[in-house]
Image (tube, rainbow, N blue to C red):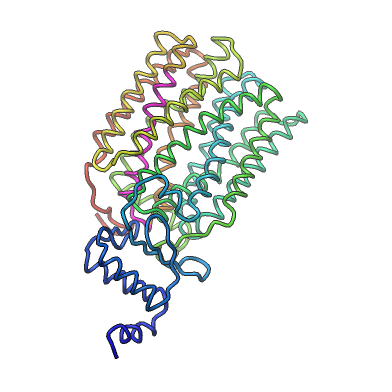
Amino acid sequence: MNVPQRLHNLFSTFDETQVVGVVARWIKALTSQVDSASRDVFRGRPLLELLHLTFLVDYFQIPCKWNSLGYTYASNEGRCRGSYTISVQSDRSYRALLTLPYVARLLLGMQIARIGQSMVSVAIVLFTLTSYHSAGLAGMATFFSVFPGLTVSPIAGALLDRHGRMRLVALDYLVSLGALALMGTLALTGLLPAWLLILIAAIQSLTNPLSATGLRSLFPLIIPSHLWERVNAIDSMGFVIATILGPPLAAGLVALWGGPVALIAIGVAFGIAAVVIAGSPEPSSPMAAPGPLLVEARQGLIYTWRNPTLRALGFSISILNLASGLSNIVVPLIVLERLRLSETVVGLVFAVQGLTGIVSAVGFGRMNSSGRERTMLAAPMALSSVAMGILLLSSNLGVLILSMALIGVLQGPLDIALFTLRQRRTDPAWTGRAFAVSMSFNFLGFPIGSALAGVIAARSIEAALAFSAAACLVAGAVAITLIPSRQDQPAQPGVKL
């Protein structure tokens, strides 16, 4: 009996997953080039690659798929039990990213929802300013549309790691559809007092971490690490595209048909996003056997706090987001009350930020950010203070547009460095819990900044702008000081430091 036949007989007692595991370990021993995060088990050795492919396909007839990244094994028994990809050329192109299974559909659904989220943040402010004529209420409505969700993010992260991501992401989209439709319908019938507006916004925010964290924590599980800069560039571009399209659409709807109709229309966008991602499979996750939900949520908090990079990102980005929350209220106030222009101009001003941001994200997405993340974070933070500070000199329309354009340019490298650094320094087994806590920690400054803006800007827009510029400078200093240049894996929860 020849050697191949003996090997065939030996492995015929194993199931498909075991066979691929054995072969993967064999290749790992020969090449020592395994990327554990992306499960790339081979790079740059054509002869061994050919041998591996022959071993898998010719002798064991294991079902495989071919894409631009390489030869991928995946079980056909319902949920994917394992995936091993042999890179042919480590293709770093956007085309290689979009040919991965289901990635294009997920990005499309996420983009539709992002546009809806961008529309909500503007529509609620314009609706409260035009219907209730109160900057303070606009700030409080924005605060309660975000903050309650941040407080439950550890539980959301535990649910994502335990029950998978796609169903929970779709659940959040459907909750947003229902809440916005209810809000708009009550407003049309004159049955939406201020307290009920805030209550509905607060309840709707409770599921927000499911979609905000769910898709982003999915990327490290389904996308090879050499494509992380590309997907993070698209992720960043998704925000700026939403900034380009969302505010003008929201402002236009409010100007043409009023705030209630605008809220209902935005809810429909979330429903469409839920339909787009429906049917996407759940990837395998390296999480251990689940324990009590609250215990897992607590462990996610502990892991994030003990991770020096995630902790430093939380402090620096949350301080920066104080400025973002302030500008979300101050910019509409400048346009509507100081310049006496229409709601449509508010949307167009925000769109300028998005246009410059998308160019920036595409350009910086082509860079390898490894080792440069701290600079790509701290420099844009500090320079954002200049963009806010020029509004103290003059707040006419031209200067306002220039300020928003500069902020958009600076957002590209900042987002890419933030997303990639968090992926590199988070254990894959903790992506749901750690990402949920980290992202909520990072975003904590936004609702606080919006609430502060409602109080400060009602007295002095200049004081609000000065506070925003100072927050940007402090954020840059915190980032360069606290984020470690390198990091070992943090201690697991329950292990004494």
Magenta stretch, main secondary structure, is helix
Nearer to us in this view, 414 or 336:
414
Extreme bottom residue here?
1
> Is 405 one of the magenta-colored residues?
yes
Residue 117 in the image, given as x and y percentages of width and height: 55, 36
The quarter of the image holding the C terminus is bottom left
Q: Quadrant of the N terminus?
A: bottom left
Which residue is depicted at the point 33% across and 62% down? 86
Dividing the picture into quadrants, the one containing residue 40 is: bottom left
Q: Nearer the viewer, residue 375 or 22?
A: 22
Q: List x then y, in percent, for residue 289.
A: 43, 67
**Residue at horizontal 56%, vertical 23%?**
347
Quarter assignment of residue 35: bottom left
Q: Is residue 194 above or below residue 221?
A: above
Residue 473: x %, y % from top left: 31, 24
Q: Is residue 308 magenta?
A: no
Tell me which residue sits at (53%, 49%) in the image: 105
Residue 8 percent coordinates (x, y):
35, 83
Label total for image: 0
Left or right of 81? Residue 381 is left
Identify the residue at horizontal 30%, vertical 67% (top origin).
Answer: 50
Relative to 475, is 202 on the left or the right?
A: right
Front position in the image: 395 or 229: 229
Q: Which residues are magenta?
A: 403-429
Query: In the image, is residue 94 above or below residue 432?
Result: above
Relative to 177, does residue 384 appear above or below in the rendering?
above
For residue 256, side relative to residue 237 (left or right)? right
